[in-house]
Image (tube, rainbow, N blue to C red):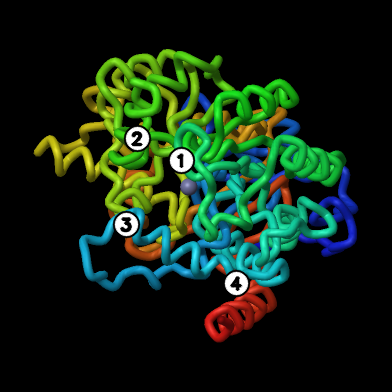
Amino acid sequence: MLYCPPLRFNPGRVNFYESSLFMRTLFAKSALLPNGWASDVEIDIAESGDIAAVRTGVTNSAAPQLQGAVLPGMPNLHSHAHQRAMVGLAEKAGQSQDSFWTWREAMYAYLGKMQPQQLQAVAAQLYVEMLKFGYTNVAEFQYLHHDQNGNPYANRAEMTLRCLQAARDAGIGITLLPVLYRYAGFGGQAPVPGQKRFLNDADGFLEIVDELQKAVAEDSNAVVGIAPHSLRAVTPELLNHVLASFSTGPVHIHIAEQIPEVEACLEWSGKRPVEWLLENFAVDQRWCLIHATHLTDQEITTLANSGAVAGICPTTEANLGDGIFPTASYLQQAGVFGIGSDSQVSINPAEELRWLEYAQRLTTNGRNVLAAEAGASTGRTLFDGALAGGAQACGRNIGKLEVGCRADLVVLDSDHPRLVGRSGDDLLDSWIFGCDDNPVKDVFVGGNQVVADGVHIFEPRIEEEFKAAVVELNSSS
Ligand SMILES: [Zn+2]
């Protein structure tokens, strides 16, 4: 087991760890660099947590050797942490046909009970699980803002700050995406009671953004973006107002996830959601369109040309019966994409990528549908794509093992029975398409080790607090 001291946990500080080393070096027999697989690689990590140098072909390294192939950590571009606590509780058939909308009722009832400390405990456990599976940054799309009566907490950003603290406790990088939620439907429809914890006007929302920006000002593992929840939840005027006050940083929005949403948008505007957004707002590389499931051929082309990221969440989209993103056509047009764990039914990036491809195989009766070209590995194509799009959507310098990027490293267990004897792209394909269990062995975030030999370094404490929170939530009314 490789474990890289010295690390001192100091939760009172902005940074997760305080390291007494100015620079350290790790050695990998094999690593996936931006231009492909490389052998005998030394990676220097600066005190800041960024990669300071990468050398290949080093045959006499004295640095500690990582025990397997090294990959960049995967960004998770879409997470609702609170939903981790209710996974599995909405799988019983209702009286009529179940859908996204009946699931949403169950979700509203559950989250209506959640207290700040419970959210923090649930998020910390979730982030530990993400790290163990190889996600090293999470984009937290957080809309649970107010108390159970819908009144703001003393600090209006309380609940999102709880997610930030959970990320610091677990040691994962985070892109905080406070959600702008004001209305229940297109054209400024009045919200329903189950939404009272979500609601803000422009001033209230910008106060949350301001609090979060202050909180991460000196944190090299966190940034702040914004997330207008959906075109249902804002008006064009409100969205324009908020964007005018937020000129840099990621902008994420749920869009075209459900057919009834597309129909309601057509009724309101005469346009489909993605069509309307791209015609009315300057959607560019700052933007991440979550789901974007229901697209016409013209919308696929316009979205791909915009440079925005399509935030695809295959296991959640399957669980909720959303539909299938037209990935093959979108990738043929060089569309940018990333993956998210969204409702947390799976927190395994390999499973998201597997189902991204399998959905295409099931609908086209073909194989290796998403591979970049003849002879290319499907796993490698999807892994590279999700790294690049995920990093762009998260607004951080992550997802690459190169100088200046965060030293977010994932080590696959080269001795795992499903991976033994594999190398290069075969290793990635064997992980993504062939592993039922988790072959991630060690994980580093900003150069600090958070998972050692498959175990998170604070796992027992965080898991105990999570279990207590879930028992409380299940027994409260
Ligand atoms: Zn979502």
What amino acid is labelled 2 in the image?
Ala
What amino acid is labelled 1 in the image?
Gly
Q: Position of residue 357 (x, y in %)?
A: 27, 41
**Callout 3: helix, strand or loop?**
helix
The residues bearing labels 4 and 2 have C-alpha atoms spaced at a distance of 30 Å
Residue beneath the point at 89% across and 61% down: 12
Q: Upstream in the sequence, badge 4 or badge 1? A: 4
Q: Quadrant of residue 171?
A: bottom right
Tag nearer the camera, 4 or 1: 1
Q: Give me the disc on residue 264.
A: 2
Circle 2 crowding by C-alpha within 10 Å: few under 14, some 14–19, many from 20: some
Q: Is 216 above or below relative to 243?
A: below
Q: Which residue is mark 3?
A: 319
Q: Which residue is mark 1?
A: 185
Q: Position of residue 103 (x, y in %)?
A: 37, 61
Q: Is 228 above or below relative to 15?
A: above
